[in-house]
Amino acid sequence: MYYENTTSLTSSSNTSDCTTFSEEKHGEPNTAFMSVILTFGTFFIAYFLRIFRNSRFLGKHGRKMLGDFGVPIGILIMCVFDYVVPYVYTEKLQVRGGFNPTDPCKRTSWFVNPIKPLQDGRLDLVFVLAAAVPAGLVFILLYMEALITSLIVNKKDNKLKKGSGYHLDMFLIGILAFVCALLGLPWMTAATVRSVTHIGSVSTFSKTTAPGVKPKLDKIYEQRVTNLLVNALIGLSILLGPVLSQVPLTVLFGVFLYMGISSLSGIQLVERIECWFMPVKHHPDAMFVRQVRTWRMHMYTFIQVVCLLMLWIIKVTPAALAFPFFLILLVPVRSAVGRIFSPSELEALDNEEQEVTETEDEYGETYMPI
């Protein structure tokens, strides 16, 4: 399972001169139009290359390679396009070169003394003790992220042979969080998308020539070599600071847009929301349609949408610090929903009905309309 930093290390100050900052430009001509082109250009290139993998052109392995590397290809093409149009200003990614603290003007040492604010008189002891409350909320987020990722990776459908080690994972995350806090580094948390992608890359499927029969998951090569190499390459990216600083921020926005839209495929909540706007005869042949009445299915979907909107509103307001607390409140809400719906209905509405096949990727499947 992969782990990642919860924040990024970027800075605009200069290592040799603490009073020098990057130049901020406002009102530049054609910047907004260029930003739109870079964002949607990156998105469409990555998205349609992923769709291309299911077309009839080229060979199977060539289509799969183009689909797997759609995002890097989109980033490269849009960066080249931005480079050949130098007279239009676009904001670039700010990356500090070398291995040093983000702001050396404020931090002269890697070690962060936790009792120094008390010694300097900048904080009272009561504020230090009160910090345990937000620390507990952060712990809930890290715990849930690691646990959910472990459950997804170690689900029964993956046919993993080795043990899961849930307690060991949580112990290591706790140790890393403590060490990172003393060094002023971002906390480590589980990387769900990267972990699921890695599972798919080391999976093998049964070979079948029978028409209409989909290949089934045969086995997953469980080893540590790929994990070690991937994380080593991520660490070596610190040497690519001058190259990464040429990437426009709007190109990254296109990547985020692609990840968000692609991840909607195969989510049951999205499918049930689509059923709001469909006649009953066009509803998908799914368990939540066959075993639950239509109006009760819509009521359950409405409750989920309301809870999701409440969490989003909390996240974009100053109350976002208490987001884990409101996330925990969904547990009694789920228990209350059990008084409205029968256990068989909840089983059908909560069942993902996913089947692992060779043609699926980590985000689902989309077919090219040609």
Image (spheres, grey):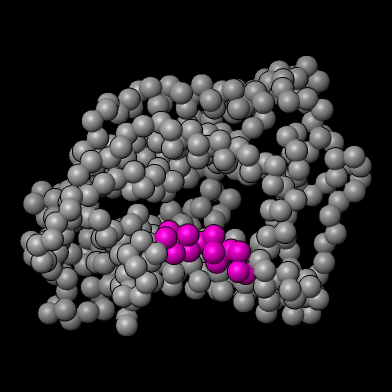
- Examine the rendered structure and indicate whether residue 23 appears above or below residue 242: below
Magenta stretch secondary structure, dominant: helix
Q: Position of residue 101 (x, y in %)?
A: 74, 34
Q: State the residue at coordinates (51%, 52%).
A: 315
**Does residue 180 appear left or right of residue 369 in this picture?**
right
Comparing 332 with 186, the one in front is 186
Comparing 18 with 96, the one in front is 96
Q: State the residue at coordinates (53%, 25%).
A: 176
**Does residue 135 appear left or right of residue 296 in this picture?**
right
Comparing 68 with 99, the one in front is 68
Q: Which image quarter is the N terminus in? A: top left
Comparing 177 with 238, the one in front is 238
Q: Residue 366 is drawn in which quadrant? A: bottom left
Q: Which residues are magenta?
A: 65-78
Q: Position of residue 231 (x, y in %)?
A: 52, 37
Q: Does residue 49 show up?
A: yes
Q: Position of residue 292 (x, y in %)?
A: 10, 62
